Amino acid sequence: MNIKIKYCNNIDSAKLTIAERKLNIKFAPNGTGKSTIAKAIAFNIAEDKDLQELMPFKFRDANPENKQPEVAGIENIKNVMCFNEEY
């Protein structure tokens, strides 16, 4: 499954692949966007969360092109779990 994420926190554009019906683990150094990816997917599938919460700071005051957070390719994802310090 190919996922595209745009304009979410520090991510301008990202493409990632996850395996369906498998445990997918993404790891990288701090500050590279792992939590943002998880939140973008979770916010997009949750009815009580707003993807707008991930609007990059650089677009919050001045956004003449009206860029908005986007997530595509997650139609088959029903839930997401993020194992972090809050878990």
Image (cartoon, rainbow, N blue to C red):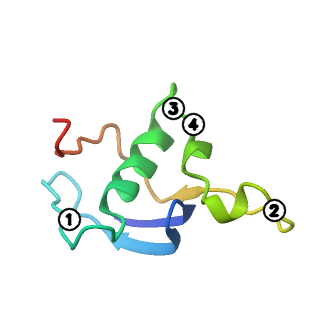
Q: Please state if 8 lies on the left or on the right of 20 as rendered.
A: right
Query: From the viewer's perspective, is the residue at label 2 or at label 4 nearer?
Result: 2
Residue 62: give its label.
Answer: 2
Specify which label sits upstream in the sequence, 2 or 4.
4
Q: Residue at x 87, y 66 (%)?
A: 64
The residue at 72%/55% (across/down) is: 60
Where is residue 16 shown, x and y percent of the image? 36, 71
Nearer to me, 2 or 55 = 55
SS assignment at label 3: loop
**SS at mark 2?**
loop
Marks 2 and 4, Cα distance to the nearest angstrom?
20 Å
- Which residue has dot 3 on it? 49
> Residue 50: which disc?
4
Looking at the picture, tell me which residue is in the foreground, 54 or 19.
Answer: 54
The residue carrying mark 1 is 26
Q: Amino acid at mark 2?
A: Ala
Other residues around mark 2 within 10 Å, as few (<14) / some (14–19) / many (≥20):
few
Residue density around tag 3, few if under 14, some if 14–19, many if 20 or more, within 10 Å: few
Q: Residue at x 31, y 37 (%)?
A: 79
The percent position of residue 84, horizontal first and vertical second, equals 18, 46
